[in-house]
Image (cartoon, rainbow, N blue to C red):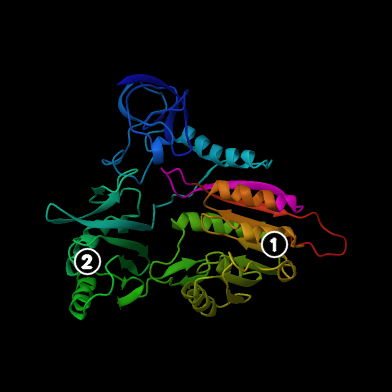
Amino acid sequence: MTTVAITRLGSRADGVAEDGLVVPGALPGETVRVEPEEPDGKAGKGPRRARLVDVVASSPERIAPFCPVFGACGGCAVQHLAPAPYAAWKRGLVVAALSRAGIAAPVADLVDAHGAGRRRIALHLRRIDGEARAGFMAARSHALVPIEACPITVPALHRAPAVARALGGPLGGGAKPLDVLVTATEGGLDVDLRGHGPASDRARQALVRLAGDLDLARLALHGDIVVERRAPVLTAGAAALVTPPGGFLQATASGEEVLGALVVAAVGKARRVADLFSGSGAFSLRLAASASVHAVEGDGAALAALDRAARGTPGLRGVATERRDLFRRPLLAPELDRFDAVVFDPPRAGAEAVAARLAASKVPVVVGVSCDAATFARDAALLAAGGYRLEGVTPVDQFRHSPHVELVGVFRRPPVRGRRSAA
């Protein structure tokens, strides 16, 4: 056991000492007593880590965590830091990522988009000591931390662990590990069970009965709908959207509203907009209120949901959909040049191929939405090399208490004489 001084908060919300020692749960300015751990990775590679034993001298920025399993559960990483330094740290993650990529751009203050809480929860169901337990994995571990409710979710999801335990019954009660994805919708809880494989007719009938007893809106098994008692509707702009079971969804309703407003404001008066990696249309359905939208996505079920929502919403300018693997077949520059603005919102891996094509295009306005500051910065560097200027970045915190930060960046190409401006 040893005593160390913590100098900074790392990108994963771990305290870091001057010599690089990583101490989860410690804060800058603290003196802590720690117990060294074995190095991560093969052949002892990876950062040196230590377990926090005791805080000898506490930071004035330390606050009491509100969750009883904080520190054990691997979900939240930073409930113990006061709001102001927390916001500065999270904004700093974006600033640092851009700096490493050689990108100079204004970064706005962090926008809090937690709202009423997370509207989706992904639980793991396991049998432990003969009982079905639902919860999250411990940090850096496959050990389950059972929970009764997650306090950072919307109230409708507080019963999700009990729902997961009940639904696991006909599927072995956790003897075979299950993942249970639960989403709060306007129609009620939407549940997708994963990990079991095909279920017998008897098990499916039992699940149908349980869906009624639990008053679920919809229940699916690996995306295959077992029963839909009510439509699991979500509001996207003026549209009523029903996403596929387990389909992508922004973490909070407030987060989607904030991101959508930033995207709509950035494209301005653009009349023709491409929405790349559109998913089920969180942005397309908002953009279509004032522009003709071409939505491109590789997931056919997501595009079908978008198309149904667009057709059922009066007053939209029109949404065309195209199923396309944008990683393998990004739109070419001539295809992009017919748009006044392009929006891209890729998975965490980023949109490197798309950014390279955009860099060669003449699109006046490009709006990048990302959940990973590092891959966004990499893609921004490609756009900058192609002549775009990153006008500004707004970090959005819909993953409160985690190291993840969403962001929206607006790129503009200097206007070319004779070409219509999109803004």
Q: Is residue 198 above or below residue 379?
A: below
| Residue lying furthest right | 417
Kind of residue at disc 2? Leu
Quarter that holds the C terminus: bottom right
Task: Report the side of 410 relative to 239 (left or right).
Answer: right
Q: Which residue is drawn at the image coordinates 64% and 61% (left, top)? A: 354
Number of other residues with Cα within 10 Å of mark 1, as a class: few under 14, some 14 to 19, many 20 or more: some
Instruction: Name the secondary structure under disc 1.
Output: helix
Task: Report the side of 71 relative to 416 (left or right).
Answer: left
The label shown at residue 357 is 1
403 inside magenta stretch: yes
Which percent across, then down, holds residue 69?
27, 42
Q: Residue 265 is drawn in which quadrant?
A: bottom right
Q: Residue 323 is drawn in which quadrant?
A: bottom right
Which percent across, then down, holds residue 185?
37, 65
Instruction: Name the secondary structure under disc 2.
Output: helix
| Residue lying furthest front | 43
Task: Specify which label sits upstream in the sequence, 2 or 1.
Answer: 2
- Give 150 or 248, whichever is nearer the viewer: 248
Circles 2 and 1: CB atoms closer than 8 Å: no
The magenta segment is 383-404
